[in-house]
Amino acid sequence: MHLRHGLARWWVLLGICAAAIAWLVVGGLASNIVYFRTASEAQADRVHDATHVFRLAGAVVPNSVQAVADGVDFQLTDGHVTIPVHHRGDPPELFRPGAPVVVEGHWDSPASSAFFASDRILIKHGSEYSPPPVPGQNAPANAGQANATQAARR
């Protein structure tokens, strides 16, 4: 009888620990996941979103980028809806017309003519990096190292 009570305690303790770990994992993930909306979704929910902060994804419309005193104005599209964006601050170096971006901010007002006021631009890019070519250098980057190794063997 005593053995059953001890075993039951361990199962209860194991269940409590598993529930606590599950709660931490699910709670931690839920609070750290940030979704973005397409231009069409944001336009459809404009009245509901009012001036709440959210992320908006799309491509920068060609010939729409204009530098202004406090940042840059441009248009963002998902191919169906185009939204005017005013970004306060300097845009990232990879920002250019046609670039896929995610902007963080809010609607200037709930009016249908309002622009999206952004304070952060995230550039969506591939995972491969290749450094820019160095002018006047045609040899591979490790050529000097190979030459030094060959000289040391002589």
Image: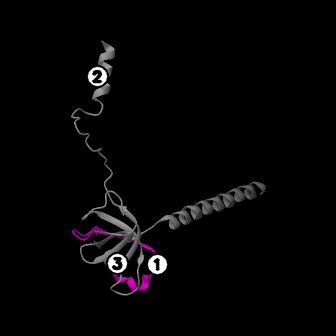
Distance between the alpha carbons at the discs numbered 3 and 1: 14 Å
Q: Nearer the viewer, residue 143 or 20?
A: 143
50 over 73 or under it: above or below: below
The residue type indicated by label 2 comes to: Asn
* Residue under numbered circle 3: 41
Counting residues from the start of the chain, the first of labels 2 and 3 encountered is 3
Q: Position of residue 43 (x, y in %)?
A: 34, 81
Indicate the secondary structure of the residue bearing disc 1.
Answer: loop
CB atoms of marks 2 and 1 within 8 Å: no
Q: Position of residue 60 (x, y in %)?
A: 27, 68
CB atoms of marks 3 and 1 within 8 Å: no
- Is 69 a magenta residue? no
Q: Residue at x 28, y 67 (%)?
A: 59
Q: Nearer the viewer, residue 91 or 122?
A: 91
Please tell me whether mark 2 or mark 3 is closer to you in this view. Answer: 2
Q: Residues within 10 Å of mark 1 (few under 14, many from 20)?
A: few
* Residue under numbered circle 2: 147
On the picture, is 82 further left or further right than 3? left
* Residue under numbered circle 1: 52
Counting residues from the start of the chain, the first of labels 2 and 1 encountered is 1
Distance between the alpha carbons at the discs numbered 2 and 1: 60 Å
Q: Which residues are magenta?
A: 43-65
The residue type indicated by label 1 comes to: His
Circle count: 3
Residue 77, quarter of picture: bottom left
Indicate the secondary structure of the residue bearing disc 2.
Answer: helix
Q: Residue at x 34, y 78 (%)?
A: 41
Q: Position of residue 117 (x, y in %)?
A: 39, 75
Instruction: Indicate the quadrant containing the C terminus: top left, top right, bottom left or bottom right.
Output: top left
On the picture, is 43 further left or further right than 136? right
